Image (tube, rainbow, N blue to C red):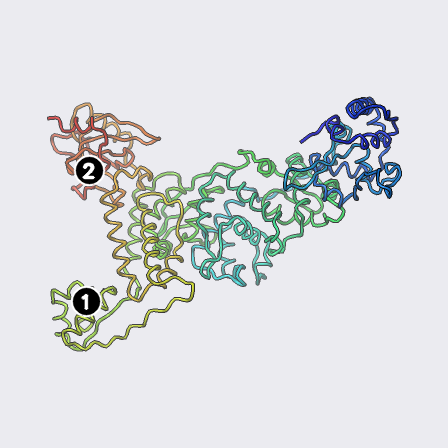
């Protein structure tokens, strides 16, 4: 906030005005009151005395003014006096007061105060006092030193602010592959470092690395995710936090501001994590000054590091070191894609300069990946700047072979182990490619998911007996039938885990002696979750995970969370909870209609022909048979519809209101989910030459909501 010289003089007492006049060598009329004395002193100062007094300042005095200038004219009083000396209270009526103190000031700060070049402003209640410079004095100061462009030399670098975002997303996705147990409660083990490093755009040489502290950019990525609240140790494993999924959904500019604001908070805080990661020491003042100078540099120019260090001196105090600035330029700032160094020279790229100013054009728009089938895999050409959310999810289970990404049976099996469905895999790939997948790719992924489910290793409860007839009789008992699962052999039968205790009691009442060899449930530790609470949380997390079939989840729960909750469940409770989650999923599939959030994972056969057929059916008041993708079941369905209204659009999606013969009700269909037109009966309108397909499962779509539509439907 700029303060004028007249305002500064008005805040001084009559005695202080007299001291200011004497400090400038001016006469002071003691017969004038404060108002008149203030006006006369202001007139004499702006008439030329202010400039003459400025020319007589020493180098230390000018350094103090330059520090105020670098801080936009305002510094806290304790910071200013700590760097440039104390300012004694001016009380000439005291017997021990110094005589004519303006002639022999004890410090540059006191000299500037007597001259009126520095004003002590009382802060608001609870705020410290500040020192300000009048606007007329700031106008006398020369521009602050800035590094000048050196002989232009091209310094190339592959690191950009976009690279930082993409690699941070890859870091979050890599931590979803397997639970990573931290070392010393914070650091990533070497095995995890190699897994993460292989997925980064800018990789490091980890051959001689035995600790995360020996890495460079990997350590900086971990630090940003740590201070940004994107990951944390959770039940003994380092996992992404719910805030990480919110960060992945932000725009590139907002992601950058999130990270940079978290870094500033850490550097200005008391318990700084910066030192724990052993980055070059830097004080908040030096960091702020460095960012200020870098923002004023011309992008693309080549500067020398010593010139940059010299330009920072007016911004810092004598007790603050700026010797670490070269290490900051070659380390964290280079890893963030802001600077590129070569020897004693550095440059600031245009995207980095724009990112420091918060300009939206600093980041490249997300680019679509390409996918094609080759051999026994689907190969992907990931763009240099993919979308961060699907990229993080894909990095958790995609196959990386010699720098090339693919989706094969093994990667789909990893996705299934992490709790993903075929719909999840297809959605991630469609988001990366920016369009629905071809039908062949969709069917191939479904095949791989079925293969992954062919052999499942799980715990179960088994009832055994050497007498096959006895075991068969118990299975046929109508009262015990629901307690048994599938038969394993003539002497072994699976028992539903939740019914194990009840089966044992029933058999005991009938006189059968049952020897139990089940391990007892573990007693939770003090302050840990109880088994009952773990049951509720596991079921809630599993149902939330299954909602990905219907809507795009804002937060993806890591599979390690489900595994940890499952380990806390009572023995034999997992199957019962799985059964409950399956029932909920099935009921949701039959209840939820419309599904406006997700596009179809399968591309349309001929969008133009489909649209023409719908319009022709509406004009002729006839019916057509369509193949429609049902999100509830994740499969194609066949139904015959009769359009009631023409095609309408809402929020960028086209719909058709039609009567569905299979559902015997009016429904709303999304046009982009109509995969093709099927040959229809004689009273329908169809595209000639369309292949036949037998009728399949029909699922009710969005009911028509308006009463007018209901009347139109029920009219004869």
Q: Quadrant of residue 614?
A: top left
Is 193 left or right of 155, judged from the image as shown?
left
Is 399 left or right of 80, judged from the image as shown?
left
The residue carrying mark 1 is 487
For the residue carrying disc 1, how many other residues have a C-alpha within 10 Å: few (<14), some (14-19), or many (20+)?
some
In the rendered view, would you say 585 is above or below 629?
Answer: below
The residue carrying mark 2 is 691
Tell me the residue at 27%/31% (across/down). Answer: 655
Between 672 and 651, the one lying in front of the other is: 651
State the quadrant of the C terminus.
top left
In the rendered view, would you say 360 is above or below 486?
Answer: above
Residue 615 percent across, percent down from the top left: 23, 26
Q: Secondary structure at mark 2?
A: loop
Residue 408 percent across, percent down from the top left: 36, 53
Asked if the residues shown at circle 1 and circle 2 are in contact, with their CB atoms under 8 angstroms apart, the answer is no
Cα–Cα gap, marks 1 and 2: 43 Å
Between 223 and 93, the one lying in front of the other is: 93
Tell me the residue at 53%/34% (across/down). Answer: 360
Precedes in sequence: disc 1 or disc 2: 1
For the residue carrying disc 2, how many other residues have a C-alpha within 10 Å: few (<14), some (14-19), or many (20+)?
few
Q: Secondary structure at mark 1?
A: strand
Residue 296 percent across, percent down from the top left: 66, 35
In the rendered view, would you say 298 is above or below 505?
Answer: above
Q: Quadrant of residue 523?
A: bottom left
Residue 114 percent across, percent down from the top left: 81, 35
């Amino acid at each position: 906030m700029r303060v004028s010289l007249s305002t500064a003089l008005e805040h001084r007492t009559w005695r202080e005005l007299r001291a200011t006049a004497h400090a400038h060598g001016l006469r002071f009329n003691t017969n004038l009151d404060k108002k008149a004395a203030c006006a006369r002193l202001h007139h004499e100062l702006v008439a030329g005395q202010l400039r003459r007094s400025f020319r007589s300042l020493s180098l230390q005095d000018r350094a103090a003014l330059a520090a105020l200038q670098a801080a936009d004219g305002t510094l806290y009083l304790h910071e200013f006096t700590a760097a440039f000396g104390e300012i004694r209270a001016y009380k000439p009526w005291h017997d021990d007061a110094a005589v004519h103190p303006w002639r022999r000031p004890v410090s540059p700060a006191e000299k500037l105060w007597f001259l009126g070049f520095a004003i002590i402003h009382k802060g608001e209640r609870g705020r410290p006092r500040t020192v300000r410079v009048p606007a007329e004095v700031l106008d006398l100061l020369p521009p602050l030193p800035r590094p000048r462009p050196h002989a232009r030399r091209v310094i190339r670098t592959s690191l950009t602010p976009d690279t930082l975002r993409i690699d941070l997303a890859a870091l979050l996705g890599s931590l979803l592959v397997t639970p990573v147990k931290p070392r010393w409660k914070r650091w990533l083990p070497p095995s995890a470092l190699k897994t993460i490093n292989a997925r980064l755009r800018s990789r490091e040489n980890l051959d001689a690395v035995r600790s995360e502290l020996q890495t460079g950019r990997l350590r900086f990525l971990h630090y940003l995710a740590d201070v940004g609240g994107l990951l944390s140790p959770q039940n003994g494993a380092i996992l992404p936090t719910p805030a990480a999924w919110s960060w992945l959904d932000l725009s590139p500019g907002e992601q950058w501001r999130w990270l940079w604001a978290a870094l500033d908070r850490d550097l200005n805080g008391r318990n700084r994590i910066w030192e724990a990661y052993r980055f070059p020491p830097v004080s908040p003042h030096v960091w702020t000054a460095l960012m200020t100078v870098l923002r004023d540099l011309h992008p693309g120019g080549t500067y020398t590091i010593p010139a940059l260090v010299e330009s920072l001196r007016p911004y810092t105090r004598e007790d603050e070191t700026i010797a670490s600035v070269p290490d900051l330029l070659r380390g964290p700032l280079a890893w963030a894609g802001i600077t590129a160094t070569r020897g004693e020279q550095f440059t600031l790229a245009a995207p980095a300069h724009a990112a420091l100013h918060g300009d939206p054009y600093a980041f490249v728009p997300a680019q679509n990946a390409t996918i094609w089938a080759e051999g026994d895999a689907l190969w992907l050409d990931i763009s240099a700047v993919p979308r961060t959310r699907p990229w993080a999810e894909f990095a958790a289970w995609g196959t990386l072979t010699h720098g090339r990404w693919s989706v094969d049976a093994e990667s789909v099996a990893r996705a299934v182990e992490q709790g993903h469905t075929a719909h999840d895999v297809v959605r991630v790939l469609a988001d990366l490619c920016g369009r629905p997948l071809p039908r062949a790719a969709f069917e191939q992924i479904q095949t791989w998911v079925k293969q992954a489910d062919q052999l499942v290793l799980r715990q179960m409860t088994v009832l055994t007996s050497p007498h096959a007839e006895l075991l068969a009789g118990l299975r046929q008992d109508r009262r015990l039938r629901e307690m048994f699962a599938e038969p394993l052999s003539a002497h072994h039968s699976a028992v539903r885990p939740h019914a194990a205790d009840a089966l044992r009691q029933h058999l005991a009442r009938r006189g059968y002696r049952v020897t139990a060899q089940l391990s007892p449930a573990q007693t939770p530790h003090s302050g840990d979750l109880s088994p009952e609470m773990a049951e509720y949380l596991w079921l809630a997390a599993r149902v939330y995970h299954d909602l990905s079939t219907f809507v795009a989840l804002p937060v993806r729960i890591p599979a390690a969370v489900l595994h940890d909750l499952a380990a806390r469940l009572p023995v034999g409770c997992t199957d019962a909870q799985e059964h409950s989650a399956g029932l909920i999923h099935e009921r949701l599939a039959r209840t939820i209609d419309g599904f406006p959030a997700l596009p179809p994972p399968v591309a349309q056969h001929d969008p133009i022909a489909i649209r023409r057929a719908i319009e022709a059916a509406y004009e002729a008041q006839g019916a057509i048979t369509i193949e429609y993708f049902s999100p509830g079941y994740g499969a194609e369905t066949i139904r015959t519809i009769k359009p009631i209204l023409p095609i309408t659009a809402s929020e960028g999606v086209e719909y058709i209101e039609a009567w569905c013969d299979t559902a015997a009700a009016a429904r709303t269909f999304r046009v982009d989910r109509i995969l093709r037109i099927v040959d229809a009966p004689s009273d329908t309108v169809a595209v000639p030459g369309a292949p036949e397909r037998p009728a399949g499962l029909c699922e009710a779509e969005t009911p028509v909501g308006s009463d007018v539509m209901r009347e139109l439907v029920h009219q004869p």
